[in-house]
Every structure is written in C-alpha cells, then in structure tokens.
Image: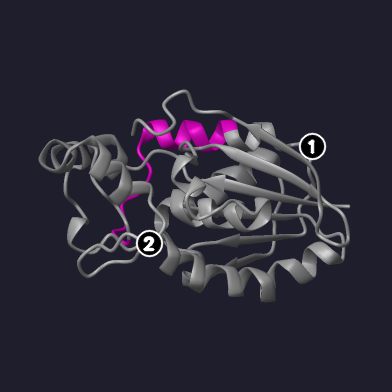
Amino acid sequence: MAKLVLVRHGTSEYNEKGLWTGWADPDLNQQGIEEAKNAGKQIKDIKFDQAFVSDLIRAKHTLEIIEQTINQQIPITISRAINERNYGDFTGKNKWEIEKEVGEEKFHEIRRGWNVPIPKGETLKDVYDREIPYYKSNIEPLLKEDKNVIMVSSGNAIRCIVKYLENISDSDISNLEIGLGEVYVYTLDQNLKIISKEIRNENKMRGKI
C-alpha cells in the first residue's frame, strides 16, 4: 500500500490581506511558516519516496520547511501543471470587497464553482484538465509501485486531486474547502483504491481566509 499526502501551503502574505493570489508569487508569512512546521509534525510517521510541488514560492517554501521538520531529503519534481488556479483579472484584488459587490451566492460560485469563468483566468475545470493528466502520468505510476508521495500546492490544485480521487461530482465540488496548511493523507492499494483517508493539521479558519 502507498501513501499519497496532499498539503496545502501555509498562509501567504496575500492570504493575510484577503487578496486573491492565483499565479502571483508571494511568500509565506510567519503564520504560514508555523503552519508548514505543524504540517510536517503531523507526517513524521511517513517515509517519502518522491515529492511534487508547484513552482510558486509559497508551495516550495512549505515543502522545504516540511523536509526540515521531518528530517528527510526527498527527491523533488517542480511542475506548473499543479499550480494554483489563475485568477486572471481578480489577482491581487480583495476577496471580501468582491463579495460585497456581487453578493454571497455569486461570490461562492466564482470562488468554488466548477466551470465559472474569470476574465483572463481559469475555471476550476481548466485546472482539473491540466492537472489530472499530469497526475495520471507522473504520480499514479509511483503509487502503483507502493511509493509514498507528497504533493504540495495551493487550494484549488488540491481540490482537483481530491475530486478525482473521491469521484466528487461537478456540483458537489463547490462544497469542498481545504484549509491553509491542511494535510490530506490517503492510503491506496495497488489498484489505487482508497483504503483510508485522514485530514491532519486541520485549520479552524478553513474557507474563511
């Protein structure tokens, strides 16, 4: 059996200010550094064979802190295929000001919906369509060999993997929130069937930042 560990990066400088981040590249703030350390403490029991991380500094820094915390040097693959959703014209804008402008229901649809377009940006479906083929080609073969894999990225990238793993419907995916610094630990058999799932380092502010 293999372990697949999905980690959302810790709080970034943009998260702290309530700004839509997307492909902007702010680093972790001090809270995010502590969240990354805590994430590492929650997975000290797992020996990793391979790490995958997006090419954004907040994810790379989170993985670096986790490696230090668990005292492991893990082979790392960096890929834009597992980057966060591109928020296009919303990048750098305050989420809560947008919510006031469009209303709570529309805001949730824009933020968490499946195929809701953003000017010059991506839908969640677009993220899924670029990320899941990469996952199938690069991560699934390792899991079938009983290798333990950690992937560190942003919220929407993690949501797409969870959607795929758990066969979540297009409509129900809008209900999935993954908190900053949270860790999803899946145990999979050689046919990639889920044997168990744990959420470690749960964030009480999930969905509120």
**Which x, y percent locates residue 153?**
50, 54
Q: Which residue is mark 2?
A: 115
Mark 2 neighbour density, 10 Å: few (under 14) some (14–19) many (20 or more): some
Tell me the quarter of the picture where residue 116 sits. Answer: bottom left
Question: 205 or 37: nearer the eye?
Answer: 205
The residue most toward the left is 101
**Mark pair 2, 1: CA separation:** 38 Å
Q: Residue at x 55, y 37 (%)?
A: 182
Please say whether residue 195 is visible from this viewpoint.
yes
Secondary element type, mark 2: loop
Q: Which residues are magenta?
A: 23-38
Q: Residue at x 87, y 55 (%)?
A: 189
Q: Which residue is mark 1?
A: 45
Q: N-terminal of the two: label 2 or label 1?
A: 1
Q: Is residue 56 above or below residue 46?
A: below
Q: Nearer the viewer, mark 2 or mark 1?
A: 2
Q: Amino acid at mark 1?
A: Asp
**Which x, y percent locates residue 103?**
18, 38
